[in-house]
Structure formats: C-alpha cells, structure tokens
C-alpha cells in the first residue's frame, strides 16, 4: 500500500474584532476543495477560546448557514480539507486537530506526509502517549506540545519540532494569541500567504484560496520557513497584524516541490513558488507535441486536468484544439470512489459525437495510474465515431509510491510497472501512446532556471526519494487489526 495525504490548509488572522473569520475560512476551503473531498473542518479562535466544527463530507455538505452562524466573530481561524490519507476515512481523523495542554491550546491543520511518522509514533506510544486518531498530524501535534513544555513560545517549540519531523508538511496552527504557518525544509507541499484590503492576513495551500476571500497574494512561504502572525492593539477596536519570519530551517535542504502539484493536483489558476500551474501544464503539452508528434485532425483534453496541456499540444503542433469530452459538473473526482472508477468514468464524462466523428484525435490526460480511465475514454471516443486515438500523457509513467502526500496506487497496481508503453497502448485500445519523458519534467518549471528554485521531487516517476523512506508506508498502518497486534505481542 502507498501512503496518501492530499489536503488543503487555510488560516486567517483579522485586524479587528468583527470579522466573520469562520465564514471566510469556509470560502477559502471551498476554493481548496479539489485538494481533498472526504472531510473538512474549521476552528475559530475568539478571545482565546476555540469553537470548532468538522465532519466527513464536502465543504458544502459539512457547513451550512446554521453551522457557520454558530461561529462567533473571531480573531483567527484555521481550516482544513482532507482526502482519506494516512489514517482511515473516519470522522476522528478530520482536521484541524485540537490540543488542550497545561502549556496552552493549539489547533493544527496539516498537508503532507511525514516520512518518519511510524518511528516517531512508536517512540511516543512507548513513552506513554495515547493517540486518538490514526493520522500523522496528531504525531506532529504531540511533538510540538512536547517541545512546548521545554520552550518559552510556540514558535520555538515548532522550530525544535522541525528538527525531528522528516518528510512533507505544510502546517497552519493557531494558539490563543498567534497564527503560525510552516513549510518543511524541502518545501514538498505549497503554502503561501496574502493580505485582505482591510489588513487581515490569510495563509493557504494555494493562491486560488487567497483570491476567493479577496486577499492579495504576498508571497510563498519559503521551504523551512516559519511565519508568526500576531495582533497588536492600535485603536479602540482596531489591531495591526505583525508578521515575523523564523528561518532557522531555510536553505538547509534541496528544494523539492512535488512536481505532481503542477501536473495534476493544484488548481490551474494557482501560482506556486512563482510558477503558474496553468502555464506549467501548457508547457508540458508543448513538450509532448515536440517529443511525441503525430498526424491528427484535433487535440482534445480530458476535463479538467488534461485541458491546459491539450492547449499546449495544439499550440505547438498547430493541430486545432477542440472540445470532444464533456464533464458532468456535479460529479466530484473519480478518485473519491476508486473501487468504482470504471462506472464513474461513464457517469462523469461523455463524448461529443459531432466533434469527434471520423477524426484522428490526440487525446491528452495528465496521468495513467491503473489504466482504467484511459481505456474507458478511448472506448467512449471510438463509440462516438473517432477514427484514431493517439493518447498523450503530460506526466511520465508512475512507477513508485509517494511518501510525501500524493495518492499514488500501490506499485503492483501501477500499469507501467507491468507493461511496456506499446503494451499499455494495446490494453487501453489507443492507436499510439506517448508519455512526457522524465528528463523533460523540468519544462513544467519553465523559466525558473535558478539552481535552488528549479528543484522538484519526482520520486513517483524516477524513484529518487529526497529523504529516507519508511519501511511500512501503509495508509492504514495505525489501524492495526487484532491479528497484527497479536503478532507484535508474540
Ligand atoms: P487510472 O484510471 O487508474 O489510470 O487513473 C487515471 C486518472 O486518475 C487520470 O485521469 C488522472 O487525472 C487521475 N489521477 C491520477 N492521479 C491521481 C491522484 N493522485 N488523485 C486523483 N486522481 C488522480
């Protein structure tokens, strides 16, 4: 089994006493919904007291007017959207996680996966720690709290915790008086911040969430950086929000932003570490057209994640771009119910016969995992009368599991581990198949030729893991069944 952790985080600190920080978090999480559809939550901080609501479901399902109205106007809030990750799909695993300790209160939201979570948790359990959830995030909360006992401030505790935590984490946390965010020293997962016109600060996984709440992007949080936001009273009901950067962990590791954020995961209107996700995908499409040209009548993209690369392929090749597939807007990602993916493709996508009939089609998608989706799409288009289908994939073949928070199926289920490219073309029924070569992945980073900022993690394609990888990466590794527990005790 591979490790899964696909999430979105959001935080707000207001400069007055009347901001509806709960509702703003809801809008922010709505913009981050694509990062996780299984559960979500918001914790509002008013006068040092925390008010929370979290549950399984989409943001629109978990939060209605009733839930949002129960939140008081507050100083700060932290929010999270989650895809079933390390730890099962349970309500108790929904975030933000709240900790109440003699040294203070904390709410924590996390995107990413620790690569040393199992060791850390074993150590903590053996020293008496009791866990309520099965997710990595509680381990992070525990370690920060342990460090907090020794340190004078929560940011010092987090700085020390970052010496211990390995792997991917973009964090937003809130104490009664501070909003804090941090990005792991490799910067695997994105994190940025911005400011609203009235002076409140917003932290979010992607810039699209800043725009949703009317905030202007300031910058990405640097890999290894901690930002501490505090409020300073300046008028009867007004405050200034101060921002302080702690950089002890910056520039110590190679920068390793997940390349799959650009290929598939992030929203195309987001800009991550200075690179537009849309432009990165267009650039991948252009590269595909250069390395895998073909004579065809039309380029079409698989909605939504193949559309930008299809535009790139069309621009580079001169083959007209067309809309040959329509997506039902009211369906979430097929990915929500992987066991039923076959049926879901049919429900989710339909071919436009009038467009594709009699044509030689270049079909662009972002990735092939098991091959199910591609096979179904080729059939759909052929049934609609397409003469030839030339499949082009704007990522290299998936060969390895991800330990840093992208949901990639187990190695034995990855079709590219079992078959050659021409065999896969045959299996999915395509007339030809071409992947983005792994050595061309840099095209997604476009003009960022700077040594440090052009670094990325592509371990799922090439097996080059930037950290030590866990021996057991099972998604359910903390959901120990009795039989396994017994084996351990023997
Ligand atoms: P498959 O049918 O198993 O080959 O899956 C391929 C489809 O899954 C592609 O259309 C991708 O857009 C989508 N996909 C690939 N990776 C992921 C992921 N980590 N999360 C959700 N969907 C994905």
Image (cartoon, helix red, strand yellow):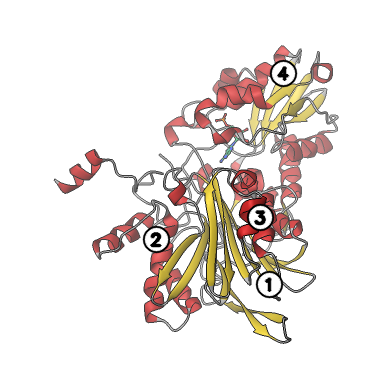
Earlier sequence position, callout 4 versus callout 2 = 2
- In the image, taking residue 133 as reference, residue 223 lies left or right, namely right
Q: Residues within 10 Å of mark 2 (few under 14, many from 20)?
A: many
Q: Residues within 10 Å of mark 3 (few under 14, many from 20)?
A: many
Residue 330 percent coordinates (x, y): 69, 33
Q: CA distance from mark 4 to mark 3?
A: 38 Å
Q: Are marks 4 and 1 in contact (CB under 8 Å)?
A: no
Residue 434 percent coordinates (x, y): 65, 30
Q: Which callout, 2 or 3, points to the residue nearer the camera?
A: 3
Earlier sequence position, callout 4 versus callout 3 = 3
Residue 183 visible, this orientation: no
Earlier sequence position, callout 2 versus callout 3 = 3
Disc 3 is placed on an element classified as: helix
Q: Which residue is mark 4?
A: 381
Disc 2 is placed on an element classified as: helix
Determine the residue positioned at 46% across, 27% down. Answer: 418
Q: Residues within 10 Å of mark 1 (few under 14, many from 20)?
A: many
User: Taking the image as four quarters, which one is ligand 1 found in?
Assistant: top right
Between 242 and 162, the one lying in front of the other is 242
Q: Which residue is mark 1?
A: 14
């Amino acid at each position: 089994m591979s490790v899964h952790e696909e999430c979105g985080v959001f935080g707000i600190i207001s400069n007055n006493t009347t901001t509806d920080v709960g509702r703003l978090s809801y809008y922010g999480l709505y913009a981050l919904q694509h990062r996780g559809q299984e559960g979500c939550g918001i914790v509002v901080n008013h006068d040092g007291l925390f008010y929370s609501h979290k549950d399984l479901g989409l943001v629109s399902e978990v939060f209605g007017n009733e839930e949002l109205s129960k939140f008081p106007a507050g100083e700060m809030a932290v929010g999270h959207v989650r895809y079933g990750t390390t730890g099962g799909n349970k309500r108790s695993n929904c975030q933000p996680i709240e900790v109440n300790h003699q040294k203070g209160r904390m709410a924590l939201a996390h995107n990413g996966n620790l690569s040393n979570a199992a060791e850390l948790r074993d150590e903590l359990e053996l020293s008496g720690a009791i866990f309520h959830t099965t997710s990595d995030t509680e381990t992070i909360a525990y370690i920060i709290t342990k460090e907090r006992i020794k340190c004078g401030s929560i940011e010092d505790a987090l700085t020390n915790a970052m010496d211990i935590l390995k792997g991917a984490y973009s964090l937003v946390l809130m104490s009664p008086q501070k909003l804090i965010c941090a990005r792991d020293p490799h910067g695997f997962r994105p994190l940025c911040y911005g400011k609203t016109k009235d002076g409140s600060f917003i932290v979010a996984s992607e810039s699209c969430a800043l725009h949703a709440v009317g905030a202007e992007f300031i910058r990405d949080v640097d890999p290894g950086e901690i930002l501490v936001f505090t409020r300073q009273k300046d008028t009867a009901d007004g405050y200034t929000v101060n921002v302080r950067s702690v950089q002890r962990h910056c520039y110590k590791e190679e920068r390793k932003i997940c390349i799959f954020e650009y290929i598939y995961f992030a929203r195309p209107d987001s800009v991550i570490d200075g690179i537009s996700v849309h432009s990165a995908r267009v650039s991948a499409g252009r590269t595909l057209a250069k390395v895998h040209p073909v004579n065809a009548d039309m380029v079409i993209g698989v909605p939504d994640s193949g559309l930008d690369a299809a535009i790139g392929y069309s621009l580079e090749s001169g083959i007209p771009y067309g809309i040959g597939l329509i997506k039902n807007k009211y369906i979430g990602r097929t990915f929500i119910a992987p066991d039923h993916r076959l049926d879901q493709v049919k429900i989710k996508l339909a071919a436009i016969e009038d467009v594709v009939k009699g044509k030689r089609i270049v079909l662009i998608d972002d990735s092939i995992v098991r091959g199910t989706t591609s096979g179904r799409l080729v059939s759909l288009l052929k049934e609609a009368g397409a003469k030839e289908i030339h499949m082009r994939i704007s990522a290299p073949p998936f060969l390895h599991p991800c330990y840093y928070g992208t949901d990639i199926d187990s190695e034995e289920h990855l079709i590219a581990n079992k078959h050659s490219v021409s065999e896969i073309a045959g299996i999915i029924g395509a007339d030809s198949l071409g992947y983005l070569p792994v050595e061309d992945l840099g095209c997604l980073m476009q003009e960022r030729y700077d040594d440090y900022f052009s670094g990325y993690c592509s371990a799922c394609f090439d097996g080059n893991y930037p950290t030590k990888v866990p021996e057991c990466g099972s998604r359910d590794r903390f959901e120990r069944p009795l039989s396994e527990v017994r084996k351990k005790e023997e």
